Image: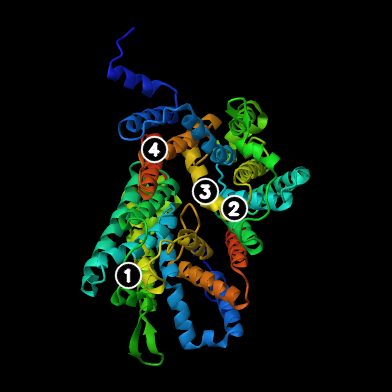
Amino acid sequence: MANVTVQSEKEVSWLRQAWARIRKIHPVFPVFLIVFLAVGYLNPKFIEPNGILIFLRRAAPLGILAVGQLFVLAAGGFDLSVGSQVTFVVIGGALLINNDPEKLTYTLLVLYGIGILVGLINGLVVTFMKVPSFIATLGMLLALKGAGLYWTGGAPRGYLTDNFRQFGRGFLEPVPVVERFPIAVVVLIVVVAIAAYIFHFTIFGRQILAVGDNPVAAKLSGINVRRVRILTFIVSALCAITAGILEGGFGGVNIIAGDGLELQAISAAVLGGAVLLGGRGAVLAAAAGALTLEALFNFLNLIGQPEGVRDVVQGLIIIGAVAYAAINARRR
Amino acid sequence: MTALSLENIQKRLRTSRIPPVYLMLVAILVVSLVLDQIYGRGQMIDPTILTNILVRSVALGIVAIGQTFVMIAASIDLSVAYLISVTAVMSSFLMQGDPARVPMAVAVVFGIGALVGLVNGLIITKLKVNAFIATLGTGLILKGALNASFSNFTGAVPESFQTLGYGRWGPVPISIIVLFAIAIVAGFVLYRTKFGAHLYGIGGNEVVARLSGLRTDRVVIIAHIVCSMSAVMTGLFVVSRLRSGAPWIGPDGLYDLESIAAVVVGGTALSGGVGSVAGTLAGVVIFGILDTAFNQLGVDTFLKSVLRGAIIILAVASYTIRSRREAS
């Protein structure tokens, strides 16, 4: 791993030190900056404080999903069920709250309860039934999507009350400097902070990487591999529910709210350097990957490109990001 | 001979080499027929309905056979759904209902298929990109290119071309003959040729295969070309039934995830090295039976999705639950 090179402090000039530090920065950050500034160049309003906050608000659900996905990816799995979970939150939330703002707490508790259950089932199926996570969470994707629609009787019914939608589209005001601050961005920051702490500074975080790197070695060194993996699926599900709650504030109650988000989340995490099949990853970089994707979509919208080009660019970027990482890994 | 006690049967099943997928196929067929007799319309035993199950399985079956090739080599192809769309749209766009243009259109779409497979294979082997991401990426590129150029049903296939989808040779639908012909060729390639043996070798242990002198990259690239070609064939079959191609028919049919699920249910490991064409076909037919049974029993569309998800997981678990390896 890193920091094995022992060099005397004196020999290394400060310039070299700085260069070494710069090289350690994950390329997703400069890439994000470039895309972001390109959007700002085309639309100066975008890089005003308010423009940035609106952008972050829109990117919050994907950022949160990417962070959750990172936990599962780092432990060597996949979670394809998160998009269905987002849809489930939107249509299930409308049914649970049933136009009664006072039921908000109850609705949120039930939704998070369902999330924990979904994560637990994913984890149990992968660890105890030994079904590869790709298949296990694919099954969950189908089941959850069907269950949500079955629950509503086919067409989504009801509305999300304003206090539910507040999480996604509301603002905290008054706030110094920018006057109003989107609640979704607060949620994003809190989730990223908690996740970064867990992933990088706790034993559980170390265990995730150990399990993803080599499950047999992890087991032999006394890690409860099953518990670690089940917990990663629960973390991912909790993130998906949170993202779903925010997403509910953006659009109406529809059955495609979360379609395709699972692949975008994986793309974002991979852009941020997470390695499929586990063992590597960083929370901030995964979130930055999500912001990069979202900024890129903004950029393509601004230059008036049709939806099609957006997919092509996303495809090229994720292949490029992984190829770059693979070539770098070989050079080392 | 010992008596056919339940225990005895269980023991025999456990020691027999019959992969669980065939037992599952029989069990699901019997349960569906019985449930249909009791709760449904009792028509499922009808030969036309049984034939229809097979016809419905043709589209998924062909692409699943191709998917089997890449998955035996421990790769995966998520781009097939969009390649099916590209094939359907391009072929009906190029044919414009004119029988004289059929050979040209077919040649073009097979060319596209070969190119997509080659690109997939090159990205995976030369750029060392994980197959999941690589084919997800090429799938997105195909999707984008298609949506940027076409937005609805485009062109038409000539009447003669629809024979592929609807024609019969005596009592047997031509599509079923096509499926079995493809399966037999695929089986021959997998079990009786060097290329087939190499695929199993690479899926079993890529490093060992390379160290023993195999050009592993080349084999994986060819497997991806085979898989893309099979997606093209599925696309041609689908468009021959729909008469015209639209960009959404591939992803709407969930051909990417369903073909992978069918292959895995059929006994091919996601980690490669084992698998068979017959197992894949059994997996595909299981899906066909489930669809038909759900329809006959009048199961709610959305409950169908739930049951499907659960059955896929349980089917795969029946292989994996006893293995000592950790799943990934």
Image-based side of A86 in relation to B225, left or right: left
Above or below, B123 relative to B69: below
Q: Position of residue A12 (x, y in %)?
A: 57, 75
Colouring: rainbow
- Rounded to the nearest whole Å, what is the CA distance between mark 2 and mark 1? 35 Å
Q: Are marks 1 and 3 on the same chain?
A: no
Quarter in which the N terminus of chain B is drawn: top left
Label 4: how many Cα within 10 Å (few below 14, some 14–19, many 20+): many
Label 3: how many Cα within 10 Å (few below 14, some 14–19, many 20+): some
Residue type at numbered disc 3: Gly
Single out the mark in the foreground, 4 or 3: 4
Q: Are marks 2 and 1 in contact (CB under 8 Å)?
A: no
Q: Are marks 3 and 2 in contact (CB under 8 Å)?
A: no
Label 1: how many Cα within 10 Å (few below 14, some 14–19, many 20+): many
Chain containing the residue with disc 4: B
Q: Which residue is mark 1?
A: A159
Q: Which residue is mark 2?
A: B82
Q: Position of residue B62 (x, y in %)?
A: 58, 38
Chain containing the residue with disc 3: B
Q: Which residue is mark 4?
A: B296
Q: Are marks 3 and 2 on the same chain?
A: yes
First reached walking from the N terminus: tag 4 or tag 3: 3
Q: Position of residue A4 (x, y in %)?
A: 50, 62
Q: Secondary structure at mark 1?
A: loop
Q: Which residue is mark 3?
A: B253
Image-based side of A201 in relation to B193, left or right: left
Q: Are marks 4 and 2 in contact (CB under 8 Å)?
A: no
First reached walking from the N terminus: tag 4 or tag 2: 2
Above or below, A34 relative to B150: below
Q: Position of residue A16 (x, y in %)?
A: 59, 76
